[in-house]
Amino acid sequence: RDGGAQFYRPVHFKEDQPVKAKILVVEDEGLVALDLTERLRRFGYEVPAPAGSAEEALARERDTMPDLILMDIRIQGPLDGVDVAQVMRSRRDVPVVFLTAHSDAATLEQAKTAGPYGYVLKPFRDRELQIVIDMALNKHRIETNLAKLQRSVAERRKLTGFLPICANCKKIRNDKEEWEAVETYIQTHSDAEFTHGICPDCSKKLYSEHFSRVGKAAKASGGE
């Protein structure tokens, strides 16, 4: 039996790799579409078959539900890339990055109407393409999380469900099992604001003696 040192092969645990986004390419020039698809897949993104027309783009977006769309502004057909992007964004919240060989003011102003998350000018470099895509995805992720947070806050500000209220003092039991005045509870759990006044019934109860004296004085004055 060998009494020497024993050697163990180290075990390396593979870290979970972040899931890459799915990107749909809309480009009517076949070679450009193929080149873009290969580049994006090399970057690690999931890329379905590119779309070459407006009709194909709308159908492909509906079927594949991409996380981002790379859209050529000038595509063949009755609808251009800006029109297609507007239709897509009306159906669901999906970020669009425009591809264009035109950087003139008129083209960019037209593209702005679709609310794009960025532009990539042709011809483009790998690093430039990656940066624009990463920034667009990150911006969309932040906006989505912020919208969820705002909806959550808005829902929490609504008074719904059952409220445990004391039958005698009319205080409400809060989430901390503490009893507090109705006014305090509503101010804490909603956006309502209070103005204070006295209703006629309470006014009579609180100031009955005063009203009585006023009435007697009025009668006495009228009788003189």
Image (tube, grey):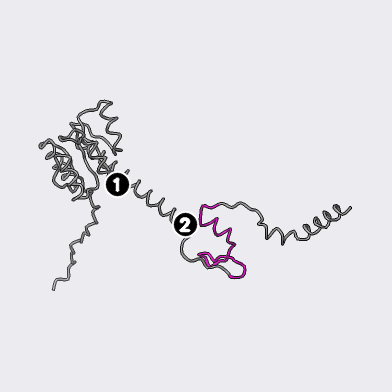
Where is mark 1, residue-wise? 93
Residue type (three-letter) at the residue carrying disc 1? Asp
Alpha carbon distance from label 2 to label 1 = 26 Å
Q: Does residue 194 appear to the left or right of 33 in the view shown?
A: right
Task: Give the camera-side residue of 218 and 202.
Answer: 218
Extent of the magenta region: 167-192
Question: Are the residues tagged 2 and 1 within 8 Å (C-beta)?
Answer: no
Q: Is residue 141 above or below residue 79?
A: below
**Of 78 and 73, the residue lying toward us:** 78
148 left or right, relative to 22: right
Disc 2 or 1, which lies upstream in sequence? Answer: 1
Measured from the top left, where is residue 175 in percent x and y?
A: 50, 64
Image x and y of residue 15, in percent: 24, 56
Disc 1 crowd rating (10 Å Cα; few below 14, some 14-19, many 20+) is: few
Q: Could you say where residue 51 lies in the image, as x and y percent from the top left?
A: 15, 42
Residue type indicated by callout 2? Lys
Q: Residue furthest right?
A: 224
